[in-house]
Amino acid sequence: MTRPTRLSVAPTGSRSRVHHTTGHLTVRVMDQDADGARVGLLATQALLLSGDDVRIEVDVAPGAWLDVVETTGTVAYEGEAPSSWTVDATVGDGAVLTWAGKPFVVSDDIATHRRTRIRLHGTGKVLMQEKVVLGRAGQLGGDLTMSLKANDDTGPLQVEHLNLGQQARQMPGILGNLRSMDTVTALGWTPKPTGEPEAGTTGPGETYFPLDRSGAALRWMGIGRFRDQLCDATFAAWREETMRDYRHRHLARHPAHAEEETGLGEADRGPVADAVAGRFRAGTCCTP
């Protein structure tokens, strides 16, 4: 059995500490500062084959940020043995995890399961995007189940189980002939979509779900490729929003760091100085 891909990030006084071990996937650091990093996930072998059990374990230490980039989409190939893709993430107090997923394509004649488990602590935040396609070109797609279980210090935040097997998705009110689904999930705060969800020409369009507590989800379903006009833009806007809030909270806790970065003291403050300080640690983590 292939071991899990493990990834952790922790802030330091100069450059964040990023530690990772290779499993089905390996990690490449794309950008980094004292508090966090942007990393790319690359497959070390053909994925997702029949029988594969891909596990990704992520730990974002208190006060850190981590932006995960999937460099390519994933195809769950046909076969007798079921396959699975599991993400297990822990996000500490004041930390931020953002994860933009690429399309996950389910071939004919395969049963595959996507599982996501998230543990949030304190004021930690998570933003994830999942894109699912049922079937490759000319296919209807095999059996897919998806589960999300997110908890914070109070208890369950979001619990969802989707049975998108061939029989289940033909039932009234499930998917019918729709083949694509795009979901943006925010946990730890409740942002609003950047536009107004509306019916689309390739499916029922987008639906916005505010959670009972801190969180929200935006979901689009359609008949083919991702033609929704809202999910990608919403993910980018929500990522910028949460990282902007992260930087403001970070500066409030460490005001001396802003002066070190900009070389400005209180006597030097003014509109221009404040604008410079506002770019503190922006890096490229918030650029789509």
Image (cartoon, rainbow, N blue to C red):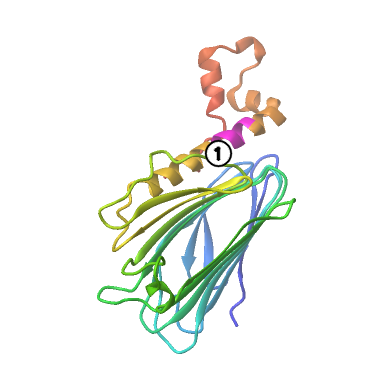
Which is nearer the eye, 186 or 159?
159
Q: Circle 1 sits on which residue?
A: 243
Residue 188 percent coordinates (x, y): 62, 45
Q: Residue at x 72, y 55 (%)?
A: 155
Name, please, the residue furthest toward the bottom.
80
Q: Could you tell me which quadrant the C terminus lies in? A: top left
Element on which disc 1 rests: helix
How many discs mark residues in the rendered view?
A: 1
Q: Seen in the image, is 108 located left or right of residue 94?
A: left
The percent coordinates of residue 231 (x first, y second) are 40, 49
Q: How far across and how far down the image is residue 56, in percent? A: 58, 66
Q: Callout 1: few (<14), some (14-19), or many (20+) C-alpha neighbours within 10 Å?
A: many
Q: Where's the N terminus, which quadrant? A: bottom right
Nearest the eye: 54 or 151: 151
| Viewer-nearest residue: 263 or 205 | 205
Q: Is residue 47 left or right of residue 139?
A: right
Q: Residue at x 41, y 67 (%)?
A: 174
Q: Amino acid at mark 1?
A: Met
Q: In the rendered image, is residue 81 in sight? A: yes
* Picture quadrant of residue 88: bottom right
Q: Position of residue 125 (x, y in %)?
A: 62, 46
The span shown in magenta is 242-248
Residue at (56, 24) in percent of width and height:
277
